[in-house]
Amino acid sequence: MRRKIVAGNWKMNKTFSEAQELMNQLSTYQKKHTSGCEVYIAPPSLYLTAAMDIFTQHEVRVFSQEVSLHTEGAFTGEISVDMLSSIRATGTLIGHSERRQYHGETDANCNKKVKLALDKGLIPIYCNGETLEQRKSGQHFNVIKDQTEVALFSLTPDEIKKVVIAYEPVWAIGTGETASPEQAQEIHAYIRGLIAEKYGQEVADEVSILYGGSVKPDNAKEIFSKPDVDGGLIGGASLKIDDFTAIIKAFD
Ligand code: PEP
């Protein structure tokens, strides 16, 4: 069974007291409602342990926004998979387009990070997606194919079932421009097809594929209603309790 998921990526936003307030609001909401999806947040790493202290009933699962390629040592500023599992975080984002754009993230590195995360029992949310130029020049299917193959196709069938994929067209992230539900479905079905070709349909049917890129309360339901869309990775709209809970409600 594919998990339905709404995940919030807070990026580099909020002071500590603002973050605590939003986490407490989200905890209260989740305890009062039976949501039709799992709810995850990826706050700034500085606030991960505070998040673990707030979401004690696992009403919201806590993810890191990034993880190191290295397991320990002289890597100033980095966070390891061991550190994440030692605070009982659920998982980590890997390969977000902002990490690719500003920090030179590559699919080969993502592959190593996905394996490191899985080895520690963490759920990797592997992000991929094409740029505007790549879409305009009709390369988007090839880009997605390369990204998916390099980052994920050395995994075993049991491993890939544990990965969550987030398709995030770069041109739709933080721009207010959203892929249409049909465009999202087209790529999600394509990714699932690639997994089916490599691992078989049964495995492909177990992989959750999220859409990310300007999901808002007014478009979430339609996007999530598409057969291969299992939820969303939400940036801007995860920073306001009313918007984020309205998106969660799209699964009610
Ligand atoms: C993201 O950063 O993963 C994202 C989807 O951002 P936004 O929702 O703001 O486009």
Image: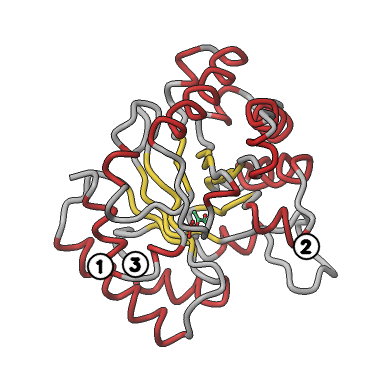
Q: Residues within 10 Å of mark 2 (few under 14, many from 20)?
A: few
Q: Indicate which label's residue lies in the foreground, 1 or 2.
A: 1
Return the residue at label 1.
242
Q: Residue at x 45, y 15 (%)?
A: 202
Camera-nearest residue between 234 and 60: 234
Mark 2 is on which residue type? Answer: Glu
Q: Nearer the viewer, mark 3 or mark 2?
A: 3
Image x and y of residue 127, in percent: 59, 45
Q: Is residue 62 visible?
A: no
Residue placed under numbered mark 3 in the picture:
55
Q: Is residue 160 left or right of residue 28?
A: right
Q: Are marks 1 and 2 in contact (CB under 8 Å)?
A: no
Vertical relation: 159 (above or below) 220: above
Residue nearer the viewer, 28 or 170: 170
- Quadrant of residue 108 within the rendered picture: top right
**Res. 182 visible in picture:** yes
